[in-house]
Image (cartoon, grey):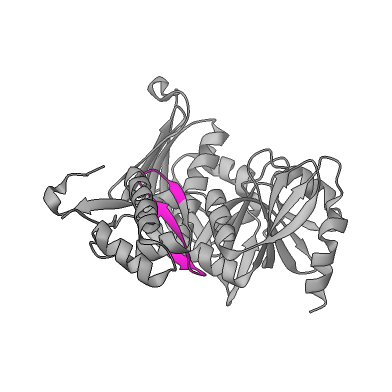
Amino acid sequence: MAGSGSISSIEIGPVRVTVESDSSWIHRSLRSEFGPFITGSGAGLRLRVTTFGEPDASCEGGIQVRRRGEELTASRGDLKLRLGMNGGAGEASILEGSLPGVRVALRFAFTVRGLCVGAILLHAAATRFRDRGWVFPGRSGAGKTTLMRRLASHRKLTDETALIARHDGRWRVFATPFGGDFGLPEEPDSAPVDAIMFIEKDLRSELRQIDRLEAVYRILQHTMGWGLEDRCGRVLDLATELTEACESFVLRLSLDADPEPLIGKRFNANLSL
Amino acid sequence: MQTYRCNDEIAYRVIDEEAVLLNPVDNRIHLLNEVATFVWKLLAEPQSIDDIVSAVCREFDVDPERARSDIDELRVQMLEKGLIETVGGGGVDAR
């Protein structure tokens, strides 16, 4: 998987992916898609990227992901990806002009590299409120983006994908460039995780604390790529440790609910500690 | 005699006497209650149904016939989900 070419390094908290490519389009795309997360030095997972000119018609439809031994492969019409499961190196071939192809390749690279260094990517919104991090995992359509719009007093970290990792002895939630409607954050940001609130749409609103087993189960449901990890033990450890350190809740929200009063008591209780 | 043991592909952790299991083959997550977790732990080593019934009756206040019925149902479910496998007894699943 060796190669030469210009490099662009992208860093989300403790996870770094360095893209090596001769294609100026790739580097321009990385700057436009991941600009605030581009960092000066290399290392981390080294991803060698080339481009191709026509979509691969044999790979139409959804993305095909396979694990063979210590290698992960993913393919669809605009992307061919091969990653070492040790998180050290990989190769990608991306249809020139396909920004989704760039995003998907980088998301896989961060997922694999993250699991290797003790970080997980969650389908979750996240906010920072007075230097505390609040993580809101939820399925597509559960209301993550809506919740972000309604938490007016919170600084938004992400409305779609949060990276969670232990940093200086505490679990922190990091903003990522893998956003939804809110797009790219202005700058990398993070906060120590105070609570995890799994959001669900419902006819009435409520906040209910859940036990650790349910919290682990729900975290796994929202963790990207846990099935990729050899024997899944590492991601299970991360989920177990995270729920030991942070309280977890189910946050049910009706369509017209204002979430701030509902979770305000919880915020205030922790902030007064 | 037919015996059973955990599929060693399955990752698991026990939290407050209950277990969460991950099956990387089908990407499914399973939660076990306290009794099923006790059985799961026993199955780290090959066990016959009789062994399991005896151990469960020693550990929990349960009627042996009820225990056998519940454990047999658990055995079928765990086999179907690939959580356990048969060993010995000719290697034939006696479902």
Residue A121: in sight, yes or no? no
Q: Nearer the viewer, residue A221 or B50?
A: B50
A260 with respect to A139 (left or right): right
Q: Residue A93 is drawn in which quadrant? A: top left
- In the image, what residue occupies the spot 47% across and 24% down? A61
Q: Position of residue B79 (x, y in %)?
A: 31, 47
Q: Position of residue A245 (x, y in %)?
A: 61, 72
A267 with respect to B93 (left or right): right
Which segment is the magenta one?
B13-29
- In the image, what residue occupies the spot 47% across and 64% down? B34
Q: Nearer the viewer, residue A74 or B20?
A: B20
Q: Residue A132 is drawn in which quadrant? A: bottom right
Residue A78: in sight, yes or no? yes
Q: How would you classify the magenta stretch by its main secondary structure?
A: strand
Q: Is residue B57 magenta?
A: no
A178 with respect to B15 (left or right): right
Q: Nearer the viewer, residue A162 or A226?
A: A226
